[in-house]
Amino acid sequence: MYTARTANNILHPPQRRVVIMASSPCELRKRIQISVCEEQLKTQTRIPWFNTIKGWHWVSNVAGWKFEPHTDSEISGDIIFYYWSREGYPPKEKRNMLKVPRIFGLHAEPGNLRWVLAAIPFILVLGVYLVIADARHAINTDDKIFPTFTQMADAIVRLATEEDKRTGQILLWADTIASLTRLLAGVGLAAIVGLVLGLNMAVFPGLRAMLAPFVTMLSIIPPLAMLSILFIAFGVGEEAKIVLIFIGTVFTITRDIYLATLAIPVEQTVKALTLGASELGVTYRVMLPQILPRLVGTVRLALGSAWLFLIAAEMIAATEGLGYRIGLVRRYMAMDIIIPYVAWITFLGFTLDWSLRIITGWLWPWYTGDNIKKKGG
């Protein structure tokens, strides 16, 4: 039987001691988590959550949960949770008594192995590509399907450092700036319109009745099916590409913001109106601050679709851009350029997503909680 008890708990006077018993360490940990959640609900305070130090589960707050040996005669079995404070840890011979799985299992805690595990798929893919490329080049030194890393490095260095003889521009950076400008313009407009529409549709029933069916119908239309219409209506300039990205993302953002706003407890609206707030005050001073971090999260999800629409539009009608360059060199089977460009697009997308995640944690730390900090959100 495994046990744990609280020390003198100053979070909820009067001081008290609670003993929790379980038949296994995993069950004990689960019961402690439930008790901590109940304590947080009662006291409206946040108790620091569980970390792991060499297999020991603990809470960093001295006034919170402590593990100590239980010596009562009615409890049998080896007790593997011991009491300690910030000044000291359990003896070294006691630290490894509780073995927590690092990789496999429902309660696995990778810890520092997280980075190693994340690198394994990349290493495997690169290794497989390297083996295939070497095998093909051993048969045909002019093989273009699987260029070697040296060939790709030479091509990308040339595009990133040398000026193009026809335009006088450094192609990689000119293409990157053109594509990012279109992407950010389209997604930015979609975020603004989606926020306004989704928020107001959820708050005002009359607007919801008028616009919700229309927005739902438009969201079903495949944006790429409208590409020809957009080129005819707006020409082959920048407007058509930005409008395509806008149409491809605005309805997703609108519907997500609409559903997130509906999920806000109606009690907040009642309290605000009781305290004298106007309808617009409820919408933009009560609802809006709670929806803004959700908007950033929705934009992060919409960026994947936005890149798809951007590359498709640039391949069809553009004179510069990442998609245009890939479509151009495709005619010559220049895989030594295509593959680095695809990797560069992936890096840009990852950087944008990571930046938005950091901004969310910085501006709205109450929204991110432990999920982003511990799980990589």
Image: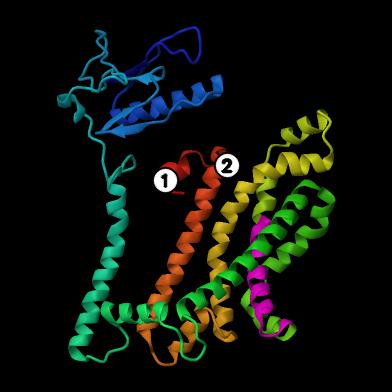
Q: Are marks 1 and 2 in contact (CB under 8 Å)?
A: no
SS for callout 2: loop
Residue at 72% over, 34% down: 268
The reply to whether the magenta stretch includes residue 128 is no
**Residue 202 in picture, x, y percent from top left:** 75, 49
Q: Earlier in the sequence, mark 1 or mark 2?
A: 2
SS for callout 1: helix
Residue at 54% over, 77% down: 311
Left-right relation of 376 to 248 = left
| Residue highlighted by disc 1 | 375
**61 is higher (above) or lower (below) than 285:** above
Circle 1: is it few (<14), some (14-19), or many (20+) Cα within 10 Å? few
Which image quarter holds the N terminus?
top left
Residue at 40% over, 71% down: 343
Can you tell which quarter of the image residue 222 is in? bottom right
Mark number displayed over residue 364: 2
Q: Hey, what amino acid is under mark 2? A: Trp
**Residue 275 in picture, x, y percent from top left:** 81, 28
**Residue 76 in picture, x, y percent from top left:** 22, 15
Residue at 64% over, 77% down: 241
Circle 2: is it few (<14), some (14-19), or many (20+) Cα within 10 Å? some
Can you tell which quarter of the image residue 150 is in? bottom left
Q: Hey, what amino acid is under mark 1? A: Lys
Farthest left residue in view: 93
* Residues rendered magenta in the picture: 234-255
Separation of marks 1 and 2 at Cα, in angstroms: 17 Å
